[in-house]
Amino acid sequence: MLCIIKNEDCLATMAKLPAGCVDLTVTSPPYDDLRTYKGYTFDFESVAKGLYRVTKLGGVVVWVVGDATIKGSETGTSFRQALYFKEIGFNIHDTMIYLKPRFSAVGALAVRYAPVFEFMFVFTKGKLKTFNPLKDRVCKHSNSVLSGTIRNPDGTTKRMSREGKVYAKDGLGHRYNV
């Protein structure tokens, strides 16, 4: 496997890449003009279209973003971006929360909660090709018998299909989306 790191404008780099050559992109682009980047202007739509072009069928883009708060209201830019990705052909595979290790933003904490997370929108081009879940969460059901019900769309309940199965002793569960 060949790994190359380039320090250049992403639009210039993507323009040089052949279509459908990237399996995974993880990025936290500039958003809502919260910082200045030495004159760099973020062209969101061009970046999104470029990512769609270079992403392989079954490939994934993880888009880590948040929203500014202006005059007491969050901008909603992150959700508009997610919907744009869908509009140009990506699937919104998952919406995850990146829980930051500490409060890092400035704000009027007298009237709002401290912002300690960002959205991680997981987009796929076509059907997801590979899923390797992180299994590092201690399973509280280790060595117990599965039981319970599942709610149907009409509100009624039914018994779980795997009822009676015994969870593995000291098993680890899938990580949640936070």
Image (tube, rainbow, N blue to C red):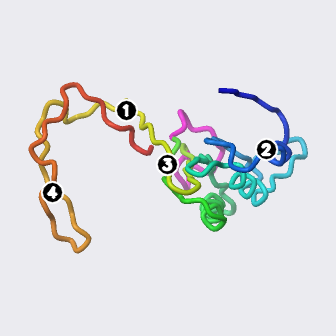
* 72 versus 137 height, above or below: below
10 Å neighbourhood of mark 3: few (<14), some, or many (≥20)?
A: some
In front: mark 1 or mark 3?
1
What is the secondary structure assignment of the residue under circle 3?
A: strand
Residue sitting farthest toward the right:
39
Q: Which mark is residue 135?
A: 1
Where is residue 26? Give x, y as percent.
Answer: 63, 41
10 Å neighbourhood of mark 2: few (<14), some, or many (≥20)?
A: few
Residue sitting farthest toward the bottom:
154
Q: Are marks 4 and 3 in contact (CB under 8 Å)?
A: no
Tag 2: residue type? Leu
Image: magenta residue range: 99-115
Residue sitting nearer the eye, 108 or 94: 94
Q: Quadrant of residue 44?
A: bottom right
CA separation in Å, label 1 and label 3: 16 Å
Tag 4: residue type? Thr
Where is residue 162? Give x, y as percent.
Answer: 16, 48
Q: Which residue is mark 2?
A: 17
Query: Which numbered disc, 4 or 3, marks the residue that appears first in the sequence?
Result: 3
Q: Is residue 111 left or right of residue 6?
A: left
**One can see residue 72 in this view:** no
What is the secondary structure assignment of the residue under circle 2?
A: loop
Q: Which mark is residue 101?
A: none
Query: Which numbered disc, 1 or 4, marks the residue that appears first in the sequence?
Result: 1
10 Å neighbourhood of mark 1: few (<14), some, or many (≥20)?
A: few
